[in-house]
Amino acid sequence: MIKRYFLNNKKRNFSIASIWIKGGSDMDVINKKGINKILSSLLTRGCDGFDNFELSEYIESYGAELNQEVFEDGISISIKSLNEHFSKLLPLLDLIINKPTLSEIEFQKVKNSTINLIKKDRENPFNICFEKWKKIVYSNHPYAFNTIGNANDVAKITYNDILCEFKNFNEREKYIISNNLEINGETLDKSDQTIQLEKSGAISNHSESLNRFDYISNDSNQTIIIIGNQTCSCKSIEYLPLKVFESHLSYGMSAALFKLFREKNGITYDLGVFNPVRNGNAPFLVYLSVSNKNAILAFELLSSLWKNLLLNKLMDSEILLAKEKLKGSFLLGNQSLDEILQREIQLISYGIQPISKIDFNSKIDEISALDIFNLINKYFSKPYLSISGNKKNISEIKKRWQKYF
């Protein structure tokens, strides 16, 4: 049984239906990491009445799009078309979810493609550094693993494994949302909804700094630094204060990271904050990339910024600016119907009622500098660090890491 929702989001000449299946790569069992990635790809490669080519041709004949993606907490499948063709395409989602072909030939293609994707992913030093970071932060938690799996596990996944996983898939909760009345779903009127938040529990931190440190040596001229910790679920009352903190650090040219690393010192290739929406304790990390000659300076600047955040509350003017930028990002995120529907159905699956602009602004306005200061000390007093760089820089940063953290 799929729970259905209709979101009346202004009249447009196109329609989207987005399905969220609860449980994604977090459902991958030991020694089969990547099985849900393969399954989700296979679902869209044929269903009752359509083989792979027929399904693609049918969708393309209407100028429509079919997309799927695996997350840690769920699988997303969506279809998008002009309004006049939507009624012909909507039934495909039911067939894809409930009556997929699951062809063994297509399984082998998807499996080989997944292995190649994993190999390509490993060519990027940032991805390797990020995987190292997740391992020390999350250990054996599902969030520690790449959603596409690992090559060794994927190589051992059989066609029968996929058929067994599909039985598990059938039992998972499913939600669908659309801006088209054809969905025949419950009206989702955000003006009548309020966000429901929970209190967060404590998180465990390793006391020894070296237990919170990992690295990967490389021969390039680039050093990557990732620092942060797991924080809270998007269901937590701490979620929005952390988003204000993220805004302060990384939103726009007025952001603390931009001003420190680019405006004042001009030393980074890439930098920012990664804090995705998650049903469990989401990662909150600062990442930056610099040349090897600037690696030590970058770590010193980052350490100084980190210690200052732990010791001093943000100024009222900084909080106000961060709040306004966050409100602006909320409005920007509501310009794309694809993003709106994806976000709404994901939150609903987590048990959260989508929040209106009025409620969002009200919640943001209530956040104080003390709220953010307390959260910074709760989650980031003992951060985790992962580095990709040459051996000399890694050795020097490791010494300073032990001294500072």
Image (tube, rainbow, N blue to C red):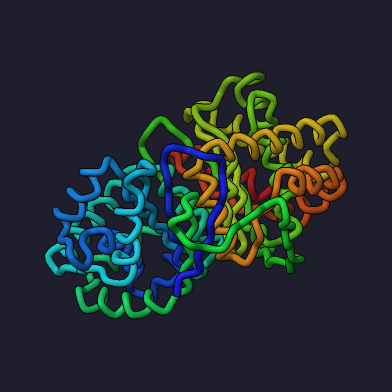
Quadrant showing the N terminus: bottom left
Q: Residue at x 25, y 77 (%)?
A: 163
Residue 313 in sight? yes
Residue 74 x %, y %: 46, 63
Look at the image and tell me whether residue 212 can be seen. no
In which image quadrant can residue 300 be found?
Answer: top right
Instruction: Report whether 231 appears left or right of 150.
Output: right
Q: Examine the image and state in which quarter residue 261 appears.
A: top right
Question: Which residue in the rendered view is the most extreme toward the left?
Answer: 105
- Residue 258 sits in which quadrant? top right
Q: Is residue 225 left or right of residue 216?
A: right
Q: Position of residue 260 (x, y in %)?
A: 67, 26
Question: Of 63 and 260, which appears nearest the observer?
Answer: 63
Residue at 71 percent across and 43 percent down: it is: 357
Residue drawn at x 21%, y 78% is 160
Q: How many marks?
A: 0
Check the image and report above or below for 353 versus 66: below
| Rendered location of residue 281, percent (x, y) | 62, 62
Q: Viewed as shown, does residue 224 lie left or right of 351? A: left
| Depth check, front residue: 366 or 14 | 14
Which is nearer the eye, 376 or 367? 367
Q: In the image shown, does 62 or 305 lie closer to the viewer?
A: 62
Q: Is residue 80 left or right of residue 237?
A: left
Name the residue rendered at 33%, 80% in the picture.
167
Image location (x, y in percent) of residue 48: 21, 68
Q: Is residue 317 placed above or below 379 in the rendered structure? A: above
